Amino acid sequence: MLTLEKFKEASEVVKQVTLQTKLVYSEYFSGQTGNEVYLKPENMQYTGAYKVRGAYYKISTLTDQERERGLITASAGNHAQGVAYAAKCFGVKATVVMPTTTPLIKVNRTKSYGAEVLLHGDIYDEACQLAIYRAKEMGYTFIHPFDDLDVAAGQGSIAMEIYGELPDADYILVPIGGGGLSAGVSTLAKLLNPKIKVIGVEPAGAACMKASLAKGQVTTVTDINTIADGTAVKTPGEVIFPYVRDNIDDVITVEDEELVVAFLDMVENHKIVVENSGLLSVAALRHLGVTGKKIVSILSGGNMDVITMSSVVQQGLIFRDRIFTLSVLLPDKPGELSKIADIIAEEKGNVIRLEHNQFVNTNRSIAVELRITMEAFGTEHKEGILAALKKRGYQPKIVQTNL
């Protein structure tokens, strides 16, 4: 069982491989929400995520014989690195099955710790099926990424550290995939402070825990569609479910668009790179509906490849009206482009790209199309530019931005 004594033991054991991720006070998110917001930056762990805690503690509880048989696990990335690194520390062999959609950075880092990597399936659940089969076939010891009480105890060490720094915290926001982190954190948090509220956060496109809690039993969701790959799980854990059910106060779901904007906020205001799953607890801040509370958001990981990062930044700028594209029709004669440019310059708009289409009308003297992609400070600035163009007699239309 997950007891206070077990959590204390796990917290001491994981100190051998974890960095002390001190709480970071967020002036930005505190101002945005009217609360006292602190970030628990588990993305700063050596493996880039909290998962090393549960993996290392679990392996520490195995017998020599269980370790010597070799370890196998399945993971969308962060648990993979945690097991690979922990196995290296114990000097044992590890095999990791990862979905084919796993970002390359997670695959390569898992390999760099000495693990054998097998790519299988589109989502975690499919990779897990192969890992379980290989464990039986080859005699490996299977290390479940979340549905294991030892793993959950290791993850719960995060709550021990939060309590040590901020014993009067009112809320902890914790990302949920399969439920190991939320089970460990919520159970220990309630043991240390029964009054604290622990809120789980899931991507709307993979809300298996919310569905399970609504039905009162472990439930599988059929369709998974989210950019939060680390929490893209169809079915939560059977073993840990009772702990989540009894200790999580509520589950909030977050849309992918909110994660995109949260990434931009995090990079610009804290200079911290957090992967989409780790941003769930940040995006959820605006859903709480409370003020004047001390809130800790757990940033569960930061293993994001640069291609995904580039895409998320661009989308974030578009969602925030920091980049937009407009279309205007104007006569095809000298000086017309200059007039448009002068208006944009007066409004402090920054032109990124121009496209001139002479074939929008058979009579070019009546109208040609000019598409302008530009940078603005936000929605108010964008509307000001559009208003200035309309005031000069143009009829600008917003079109889809393709960077």
Image: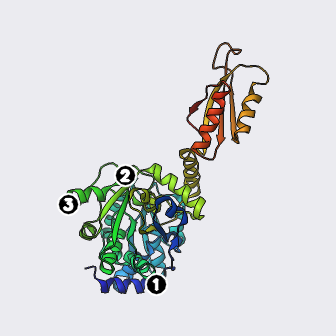
Image quadrant holding the N terminus, namely: bottom left
Residue behind mark 2: 204
Q: Nearer the viewer, residue 315 or 49?
A: 315
Residue behind mark 1: 15
Give SS at disc 2: helix
Task: Tell me which amino acid carries mark 1.
Answer: Lys
Q: Which dot marks residue 328?
A: none
Are the two marked residues, 2 and 1, in contact with CB atoms closer than 8 angstroms?
no
Residue behind mark 3: 216
Are the two marked residues, 1 and 3, in contact with CB atoms closer than 8 angstroms?
no
Q: Mark 2 vs mark 1: which is more N-terminal? A: 1
Residue 12 position by quadrant: bottom left
> Residue 150 vs residue 112: left or right?
left
Name the residue at 35% across, 57% down. Answer: 252
Name the residue at 37% across, 76% down. Answer: 156
Rendered position, 1 above or below 380: below
Residue 100 position by quadrant: bottom left
> Residue 379 vs residue 97: left or right?
right
